[in-house]
Amino acid sequence: MNSRGGLGARRAGLVTTVAALAALAGACGTETPGQPQTAGDIAGLPVTHFESGLRPEAPRPQLEVHNATSTQEDQLAIAAIADVSDFWAEQLPAHFQQRFQPVKKLLSYDPNEPEIDVCGGTTADAAMNAFYCPPEDLVAWDRGMLLPLLRERFGPMAIVTVLGHEFGHAIQYRLGAKAGIDESTSTIVKEQQADCFTGAYFRWIAEGRSKYFTVSTSEGLNQVLASMFFIRDEAGQSAQEQGAHGTAFDRTYAFQLGFERSAKDCAGINQANVDERITEQPFEPGDTGQGDIAIDADSVGLLQQSLDEAFAGAEVEAPEIVDGGGVCPNGPATEPASYCPSDNTVNIDLAELAELGQPVDREAEFRGTDSAGGLGDFAAFAEIASRYVQGIQKGVGASLDNANAGLRTSCLVGAWAGVLSGPGNTLRLSSGDLDEAIAELLQPRSLLAADVNGRPVASGFARVESLRVGYLEGSASCTRNYG
């Protein structure tokens, strides 16, 4: 995130519909204090809570896999290939009038073991990777480094996510023109389609149609989205680069598109619609500190100005951000930032937010160790903004203490972020900022999608979706979707 000089017109429509929330004041009941709140459904499916993973009664896959072992990682990977093959054996005839052809070759490898020649290189060159090789019609995976890290950090369904994605590339190769894929297709379009195909596959699992896996729509999908966040591109990359896979925001968008719609919709992803919404971009020349600025009194002052500008159209008294320890006297305590209804302030713990706003330690992520950094400056600013928009909602008479309030809050933070991506606001987004918001949303105690008492919506899928809806569609969508 960076500041910019000069103020101009705000993007039309950010808060002109926020007042409509008043009509919905008190329409929704409250939940048990201290407990995560449950969204009504997840793309039409009920919110479920159970351990996700391989079914105890799952059949033994009858697949030939070169160099396979009896490790848990290989068992999960091979079951994933068998399962996603079953999925596409249904989907290709149903949506594309085409018979499914199994992948010809499967390879499990450990990059620390003797090299195996594959796809014009060797397995030693493919550490921390999984890939599809079109010339050999081969899907391969690193069972020695990548898969153990994914399973340990995010659970077994992270392995299924990665293999489902790579199999999506095999499907593109089979569909060809039916998916708009040829030699000139950019990498980012192929990757968005493959992420979308993965989402459609996970919808099939969530509906209980898989013989091999089960996934809950709360904790299970949370783990899937967290693994997709992990395999995001670095901040500062361009979507035009060869090999671009997308930001976490872009990748979760594509996954959710597939989950909410169908594999046929995924095949409709093309360069035009990717260019219209993709967020992956290089740093601008004026970006300092790789897009991160310090969280201090000066930058919080800029944040206050930015929020006041963005929400001026609500025509309510704007909350004042004060550094007072992060809790409200005799009121909400959601440190490091709390909205205090009694005096319409956002009480922050500046020192704690400064720690949260430290840059992400990407190397620590890949080592599988705790980061010495934080979640980034935008994660800290977004937490403050989430409490600020509580004040805006209170001003128009909307409820603040139910699941809809949490999703509406995240949506309004997304709408504010959408303003920062255009001209005219004191602050502007820099590369990687939206991913920092995604990182915050996937934390167990996310404030971005929490009500005034800090109770987060249980489903990470719903949290991320609400931010995306606000960012792409503006505040009118927040009222329409999360009344």
Image: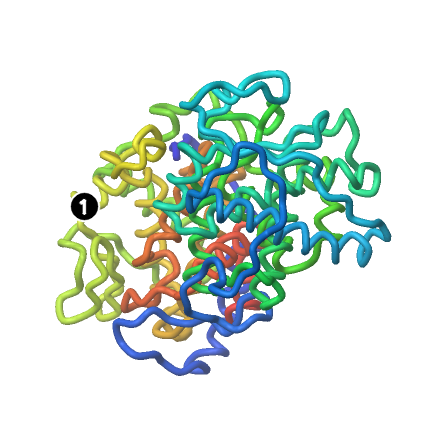
Which residue occupies the foreground of this view, 223 or 439?
A: 223
Rendered position, 8 above or below 311:
above
The location of residue 248, given as percent across then percent down, is: 49, 41
The location of residue 340, given as percent across then percent down, is: 23, 65
Which residue occupies the foreground of this view, 171 or 40?
A: 171
Most extreme residue toward the right, as rendered?
Answer: 97
Residue sitting at 45 percent across and 35 percent down? 143
Q: Which image quadrant is residue 103 in?
A: top right
Which residue occupies the foreground of this view, 108 or 394?
A: 108
Residue sitting at 70 percent across and 32 percent down? 137
Residue sitting at 37 percent across and 39 percent down? 149
- Residue 273 appears left or right of 215: right
Rendered position, 86 above or below 35:
above
Q: Amino acid at mark 1?
A: Glu
Q: Which image quadrant is residue 378 in?
A: top left
Q: Quadrant of the N terminus?
A: top left
Residue sitting at 30 percent across and 52 percent down? 384
The location of residue 433, given as percent across then percent down, is: 42, 38
Q: Determine which residue is flagged by label 1.
A: 352
- Residue 168 appears left or right of 329: right
Q: Is residue 16 among the parts visible in the rendering?
A: no
Coloring applied to the structure: rainbow
Which residue occupies the foreground of this view, 25 or 452?
A: 452
- Please tell me whether mark 1 sits on a helix, a strand or a loop: helix
Q: Is residue 91 among the parts visible in the rendering?
A: yes
